[in-house]
Amino acid sequence: MADAPIKTTDEGDFLPFAGHPVIRVLDRCTAVLNALGTLLIVGIMLAINADVIGRAMFGSPISGVPEIVSMSIVAIVFLQIAHSLRTGGLTRAEILLDRLPPRARAGLETIYCLVAVALCVILFNGLLPLFDRAWTRNTFVGAIGDFTAPIWPVRLVMLIGTAALGLQFVARAIRAGLAVAGLSGRKGHE
């Protein structure tokens, strides 16, 4: 017997729509983090251009641009990774998944998501002491007298991004579990 087609929300996403209000709030928070990451990209582009212009036209670079850029790149990854997962943009090989029937594919996706949740918990627990150390010791990058910036904000962003990614994996595991059970979403979304 063939499996019934599953209604989806995103192009390339085979999982059913999860219209629960908690999932919608999570998705909005994830979108906000993504937007902050995009603004940070614009900010470092402006800083790099100002630094290049300062070097070329005035013979004086802007202090701290390399440090700001290196910390910002890490922050951008953690701000945007949960949204990449939510929208199906996280890199993955689907050569095997594409050949499986919908329920088997959803079952494998459930396992994948649960393993990813466990990895996010491990990552979060590994990052927490790093944040605590950076906060309590006021660790910074740069050179005293020239430019210094605290590290704790980036460590905090890493914690927030990891938590958001883990929660998106939980939401995806729930959606995959619904697909395994043969449920394609709530009334009005089928």
Image (cartoon, rainbow, N blue to C red):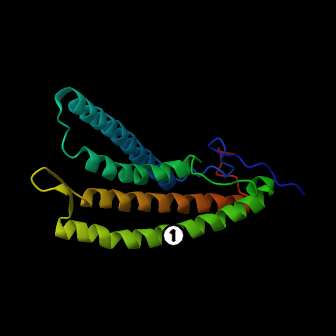
Q: Which residue lies furthest to the left in this view?
A: 145
Residue at numbered disc 1: 119
* Type of amino acid under label 1: Leu
Q: Residue at x 41, y 54 (%)?
A: 78
User: Which corner quadrant of the image does residue 136 belong to?
Assistant: bottom left
Q: Quadrant of the N terminus?
A: bottom right
In this rendering, would 10 be left or right of 122?
Answer: right
Q: Residue at x 71, y 53 (%)?
A: 94
Q: Residue at x 70, y 58 (%)?
A: 179
Q: Position of residue 117 (x, y in %)?
A: 53, 67
In the foreground, 167 or 38: 38
> Which quadrant of the figure has residue 123?
bottom left
Residue 129, compared with residue 59, is above or below; it is: below
Above or below, 181 relative to 26:
below
Is 31 placed left or right of 189 in the picture? left
The image shows residue 188 at horizontal and vertical percentages of: 65, 44
Q: Would residue 36 appear left or right of 56 to someone viewing this image?
A: right
Q: Provide the secondary structure element on which disc 1 rests.
A: helix
Residue 58, position in %: x, y?
Answer: 17, 29
Across and down, in percent, residue 17 comes to: 62, 49
Question: How many circles with numbers are drawn on the protein?
Answer: 1
Among all residues in the image, which is located at the extreme top? 57
Whether residue 181 is visible, yes or no, is no
Frontmost residue, 49 versus 5: 49
Camera-side residue: 46 or 24? 46
Query: Badge 1: how crowded within 10 Å, few (<14), some, or many (20+)?
Result: some
Q: Do we see residue 63 in this rendering?
A: yes
